[in-house]
Amino acid sequence: MDSATMGDMVMAGFQKLGFIQFTGIEGVDYAPGRNVVRMAARPEHFNHNGDIHAALLFGLAETAAMGASISGIVDLLGDTFIVARDGRIEYLARAKGEAGPFSATAELSPETITQTRANIESRTEIELEVPVTIADVTGKPVARAAFTAVIRPRRK
C-alpha cells in the first residue's frame, strides 16, 4: 500500500473522532512534513466576546501538529506509539467568528522526517517540536503554537 493510500486511511479514521466531529475540523492539505486543517465557526464555538473559544484554537493547533508529526511516517505507524507530551500557544489577535474559517498549518523539515524515520527503524524514541500557525480567512495569524510529539517504538 502506498503512503498516499495510507494517508487517506489515517484521515478517514481521524474524521471519526468525537472531538473532530464536535469542532468540525477538516483536513485541507496533508503531505509528508505538512498538515493543514481548517475549522469553520459554529455558534457553540464562541466565547462570551463572540470569538472562537481559546480551547478550540488550542485543539485546532494540536490537531495540525500531531498530524504533521505522523505525515512522513504513515507507513511506519504500526511500529510506533505517538502521543502529545506538551503544548503551548500564544494568542496574537482576536479570532472573531466572522473572520473564519480558521486554518492551522504545521510543517516539519525534510531533515526532521528523515531523522524521525531513522529513529523509528532503529527503535529509538524521538521527541519532535512541531510549530503551528493559526490564521483567519485573510491569512492573518491569530495564534502561534508548538507541541511536542513523542514517538516511541510500539511494545511487542
Image: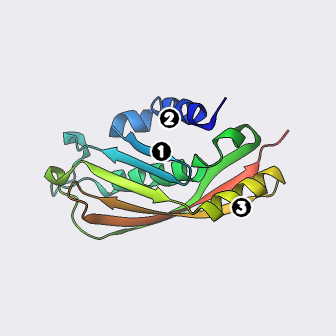
Q: Is residue 136 above or below residue 21?
A: below
Q: Amino acid at mark 2?
A: Met
- Horizontal and vertical percent position of residue 32: 56, 50
State the image quarter where residue 80 is shown. Answer: top right
Helix, strand or loop for disc 1: strand
* N-term-proximal mark, 2 vs 3: 2
Q: How is the image coloured?
A: rainbow
Separation of residues labelled 1 and 3 (CA atoms): 20 Å
At 25% from the left and 45% from the top, the residue drawn is 45
Q: Is residue 146 above or below residue 60?
A: below
Q: Which residue is mark 3?
A: 115
At 42% from the left and 45% from the top, the residue drawn is 29
Q: Which residue is mark 1?
A: 30
Left or right of 73 in this view: 138: left
Separation of residues labelled 2 and 3 (CA atoms): 24 Å
At 44% from the left and 33% from the top, the residue drawn is 18
Helix, strand or loop for disc 3: helix
Position of the N terminus, as image quadrant, is top right
Total numbered labels = 3
Please say if the residues under marks 1 and 2 sit with CB atoms less than 8 Å apart.
Answer: yes
Q: Amino acid at mark 1?
A: Tyr
At 22% from the left and 40% from the top, the residue drawn is 42
- Horizontal and vertical percent position of residue 138: 20, 58
Q: Which residue is mark 2?
A: 11
* N-term-proximal mark, 1 vs 3: 1
Q: Is residue 133 above or below residue 31?
A: below
State the image quarter where residue 91 is shown. Answer: bottom left
Q: Is residue 7 above or below residue 118?
A: above
Left or right of 22 in this view: 106: right
